[in-house]
Image: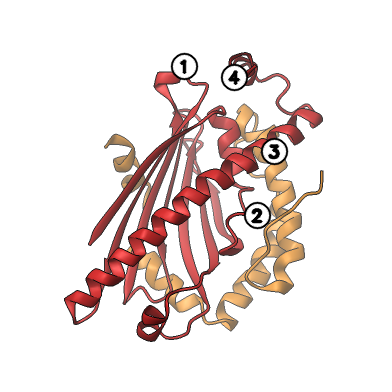
Chain colours: A orange, B red
Amino acid sequence: MGNIMSVSFAPECTPAKQEYDDCFNKWYTEKFLKGKSIQNECTEFWDNYITCINANLAKEGIKPMLDKAREDEPFSHEEIKKDLKE
Amino acid sequence: MKLFQTEHSFNYPWDQVTAANWQKYPNELSTHVISVDILDRTINNQGILRTERLIGCKQSIPRWLSFLVGGATVSYVREISEVDLKNQTLVMKSMNLTMNNLLLVKETIIYKPDPELNLQSTLFKQSAEITAFASVSRICDKVEEWSVERFSQNARTGKLAFENVLNRLNDKWEDAGVVKDSLLLNEVKKLQF
């Protein structure tokens, strides 16, 4: 049952991403969905991964368009609640 | 602006569908999705899991359109999702970051238990707003038409691809005993066989 996993936009972040994803997917199915944990337990993998991502978002020039989208369309919690009511 | 809407029911319980959603890519059909990254993930005081992702896409575009938008090869999409375990909803909202001054695609997807099928299936609702900006409105129309067509093609492929992913993961979870105690799943099986 080979685990095919998605890769990062930045190849150098893929190993850290896959470690994090593995941890998250396990936590999600075994704890979160069962209501056993409301705390994300994968922080040690997360820190590695997000440090790598943040460096590459800047390097690849993605950061400015990302920040603009966050401002233009925040997709806030309130907006999502509205979608559910429609 | 053009609107695209579709609905579908997946023959799996909601919790399993949401778990598979995180592992949807890569799959053999959605080859246009080339990367998936998580940018932020939080759980609020109501237990709602909110995730921000960056999705990288590569898709061939017709020559008349590539002349308009330049030869960009990879485009990026920002997606926000919220999983509400208590109310059993998963909402995903996204928009493209690349070339959105020319073509803006805003998409909303909702997954929730299908009330008509005794909650053993999951209802999938997808809607997208597609807007092309250009000075000549006829070009806009053509770009929008092409985009809607491509969007609905991708939506059809995406449905099939996700069915395959659900199947594969279900086998894996069964082997690992993850879904053994899922009453819902057993009910679904009784219906299927």
- Please report the residue visible at 50 percent of the width from the left and 76 percent of the height from the top: A63
Q: Residues under labels 4 and 1: Cα distance?
A: 10 Å
Image position, residue A81 (x, y; %): 34, 40
Left or right side of B101 for B186: right
Which residue carries the number 2 mark?
B28
How crowded is the residue under tag 1: few (<14 C-alpha within 10 Å), some, or many (20+)?
few
Q: Which chain letter matches label 2?
A: B
Q: Residues under labels 1 and 2: Cα distance?
A: 31 Å
Q: Residues under labels 2 and 3: Cα distance?
A: 15 Å
Image position, residue A23 (x, y; %): 73, 47
How crowded is the residue under tag 4: few (<14 C-alpha within 10 Å), some, or many (20+)?
some
Which residue carries the number 4 mark?
B188
Mark found first going from the N terminus, 2 or 3 = 2
Mark found first going from the N terminus, 4 or 2 = 2
Q: Residues under labels 4 and 2: Cα distance?
A: 26 Å
Q: Nearer the viewer, residue B27 or A19?
A: B27
Residue B50 visible (yes or no): no
